[in-house]
Image: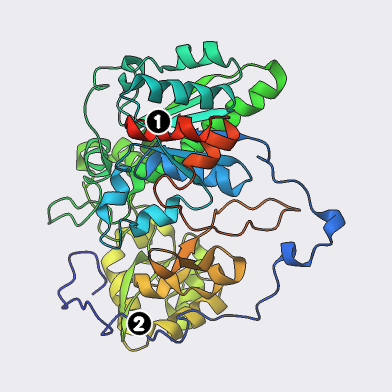
Amino acid sequence: MAVTSRPQRKQTTGRGKGQGSRGASPLPVGKTSKSRSSSRSPKSLRTPPLSGVTVIDLSHVYNGPYATFLMAMAGARVIKVEPLQGEHLRSRGDMGGADFPFAMLNGNKESVTLNLKTVAGRGLLRELISRADVLVENFAPGVMERLGLGAKTLQRLNPRLVYGASSGYGRDGPYRDYPAMDLVMQAMSGVMHTTGFADQPPVKSGAAVCDFSAGVHLYGAIMTALYERERTGLGRAVEVSMQDAIYASLASNLGMLHARGKKAPARTGNRHGGLGISPYNAYAASDGYVVLNAPGDHHFHAILDVIGRSDLKDDSRFNSRSARVANSDAVDAMIEAWTVTLPRRTIAQRMLAAAVPCAPVRDLQEVMEDENMHARGSLQRVQHPQLGPVVLPHSPLRFTGMPLRRLQPSRPLGADNDSVFGRWLGHSRSDLKAFRAAGVI
């Protein structure tokens, strides 16, 4: 049967069933064309959209660093400011202190260290802010104010400053002081309640969806404030809460709750979150699983043609979307009786040729070798000084007339202290020596 409840087959962790061949794409791939940016003449190239923008990045882990990574790849100068021992994400790695997620989110940034618990450290931050366009932080609400570095204080120093902040629950409201990380936010937001199978406990999303959703929204809020500054000349403080940012992603589930009330199931497994589409599921193949769905009648008719059941197009159980939803078990059983006999690649080739939304369920190694993402430059091979050869993501944002910026490895902790505090801010070598001796940088 289709995977509507917890699958009974034993899951593999290596190159067994469902892992696929590392050398072949599980999807049909056409001829790869050169990216448009690589063929443009120098005269057609434009300045990166955030060229000339300086960002002071106090953020840590995933949320804020992803927002500032997007800014860096759009042309901004991003100076990552960390405590002397480094931010939390560095300490999670066991490869010389450079953790892989840290490398993913902090390339193309400069790295400085600063002890904000010292008077001199806070003074150096104010010097940075006086020359910056944007500050980003995701501390708990009130931390920056207690340091004397809140938005109002810093904007008196630099009225053009855009102050971007993110936290779990926002800077007002009864939850503002609650600690929050992605797992906590998945629980509080309803993501965990709606993930998994109806007869099993709730399950967290494998991806850090709350952290990264907030990071994308934070980027958007900062860009909006920069646009306003172009008209007014004044910066603005903006904030994004993880709780707010993830809520809209539950649209299908909330729609079902609105329509069915207490009769709405909490979790729908791999079926549609609103139980509004059928087929919509993961189906066993001979070498793993595939997913496919039929948002319209023409999609379902195409599926029937592919699996050799065109005779069922007028069957009253399947001749409308509502009928198929009411008979989802029969729909899923019919499809899986066909998919289980074929490998994922063959299923995907046949369904995609018929314009049916379909994909193999791929493991992470397959995803890292994805031909489409490598062809677009979305994934790139980088020689990292601590991690060695790695595959890292580029920004998903594409700007016409701008070739993709080359991915630069994340910098060692404090590698740019001399260039930023010395050459940029103008402090002498003796000043820097004194700062180090006093535990300021």
Placement of the C terminus among the 4 image quadrants: top left
Q: Is residue 308 above or below residue 37?
A: below
Q: Which of marks 1 and 2 is in front?
A: 1
> Residue 193, how many percent across, how many down?
21, 45
Instruction: Residue at 49%, 16% (x, y): give it.
Output: 154
The secondary element bearing badge 1 is classed as helix
| Res 196 quadrant in image | bottom left
Q: In this view, does 415 lie above or below 98?
A: above
Q: What residue type is labelled 2?
A: Thr
Work out which residue is located at the far front of the displayed protein and give it: 430
Question: Mark 2 or mark 1, which is nearer the start of the sequence?
Answer: 2
| Res 353 quadrant in image | bottom right
Q: What residue type is labelled 1?
A: Ala
Query: Which mark identifies residue 75?
Result: none
The front one of 80 and 143 is 80
Residue assigned mark 1 = 434
> Residue 376, how many percent across, how many down?
61, 66
The front one of 192 and 420 is 420
Question: How far apart are the two marked residues, 1 and 2, measured between alpha carbons?
Answer: 69 Å
The front one of 108 and 221 is 108
Binning the other alpha carbons within 10 Å of mark 1 as few (below 14), some (14 to 19) or many (20 upward) gives: few
The secondary element bearing badge 2 is classed as helix
| Res 405 quadrant in image | bottom right
* Residue 84 shown left or right of residue 430 in the figure: left
| Colour scheme of the rendered structure | rainbow
Binning the other alpha carbons within 10 Å of mark 2 as few (below 14), some (14 to 19) or many (20 upward) gives: many
Q: In this view, does 133 lie above or below 286?
A: above
Instruction: Residue at 17%, 54% (x, y): give it.
Output: 198
Residue assigned mark 2 = 339
